[in-house]
Image (cartoon, rainbow, N blue to C red):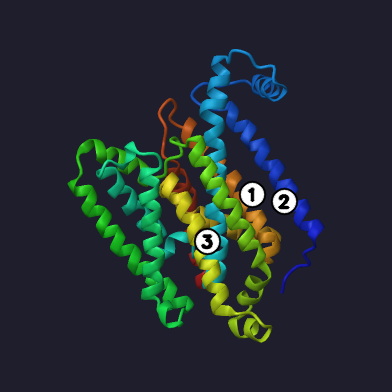
Amino acid sequence: MYRRVTLSRVLGVSALLLLLFVLLCLAALCLGAIHIAPADVVESIAAVLSGNASVPSENELILFSVRLPRIIFAGIVGASLSLGGVVFQALLRNPLADPYVLGISGGSALGAIIGIVLGAGSFYLGVPFLAFCGALTTVFLVFIVAGGSRGLLLDNSLLLAGVVVNAFFSAAILFALSIVNSMELHSISFWLMGDLSSAASKEIAVSALCLFAGFVLLYAQARKLNLMVQGEETALQLGVNVQGTKYILLIVTSLITAVAVSLAGIIGFVGIMVPHMMRLVFGSDHRLLLPAAALFGASFLVVADTVARILLAPAELPVGVITALCGAPYFIFLMRRKGRG
């Protein structure tokens, strides 16, 4: 049973979460190896927005050339991973499911490693493109292994197929790591743990466009997703093309997740924690859950990345380390709760 969800409630909750995201972004702009006072941040932003900025100061270079692109990128990746978690948990009816269950992270990682080894990093979007190809290959393999080609796409089959394909790619990654040189090993290892430091404007634009298009497509399926969570037979009786809707949701979600992973590396547990937390607060109606999870997921990853930047400053931790430290205990909590349920 869903709580009553109206358009005004969706807009109100979204506005509050958007305000939270903006405030956290402003705080993140202040924090780093070099601390910048909030008043200076506000003054610099006002100068840029009013067109009065002349020769940029050192603080402005740090703010607008280093921190702001990274914060925006973190928000986009956090929103993408959270949307993926919402849809996969609903499709598989399992609160422990997230984009990584279907092996997308493993496929992307393997594609990126191949790109680094082959020198694709010298080309614009070379490594992310190969990582994206790896993710698409994963989606195709999961479809085939789960029986999708025969029209027998089942929830448990998808879950098991994802585990099997992910295990295969993990083995391939370990093999690749064992044969690369030390420089490549460092680059690959950092990417595997989640790296938001290499965000460039063109990559941010690509990921933002994919996120926006993906969100629109997923939100258009929110009512069908609500019915499918109640049971496929119920959805069928109410006129939902269950198999067709599954394909649409799986493909769109896989694509936006793959783009995020291919550009930022493997950042685990965001897709598990954020959807579950938003479901507890706002209920399970996907007309509200989808925007809430996207906005809160963006805020969560901005905070996690800020902690990763300042914890051992001037050195940086991969953001995946922070999300794993938060997510592992939460995952155990969900497992115990599901076991008692």
The type of residue carrying mark 2 is Ser
User: At 55% across and 69% down in the image, what residue appears?
Assistant: 248
- CA distance for labels 2 and 1: 7 Å
Cβ–Cβ below 8 Å for labels 2 and 1?
yes
Q: Nearer the viewer, residue 316 or 22?
A: 22
Q: Quick check: 89 above or below 190?
A: below
Q: Nearer the viewer, mark 1 or mark 3?
A: 3
Query: Quick one: label 2, few (<14), some, or many (20+) residues within 10 Å?
Result: many
Residue highlighted by disc 2: 14
- CA distance for labels 1 and 3: 16 Å
Q: Is residue 96 left or right of residue 185?
A: right
Q: Quick check: 83 above or below 249?
A: above
In the displayed image of the protein, which residue is found farthest to the front?
123
The type of residue carrying mark 3 is Thr
The type of residue carrying mark 1 is Leu
Note whether residue 341 is visible.
no
Task: Please tell me whether mark 3 sits on a helix, a strand or a loop.
Answer: helix
Q: Nearer the viewer, residue 152 or 286?
A: 152
Note whether residue 318 is visible.
yes
| Residue 295 tag number | 1
Which quadrant would the C terminus be assigned to in this image?
bottom right
Task: Please tell me whether mark 1 sits on a helix, a strand or a loop.
Answer: helix
Q: How many marks?
A: 3
| Residue 253 tag number | 3
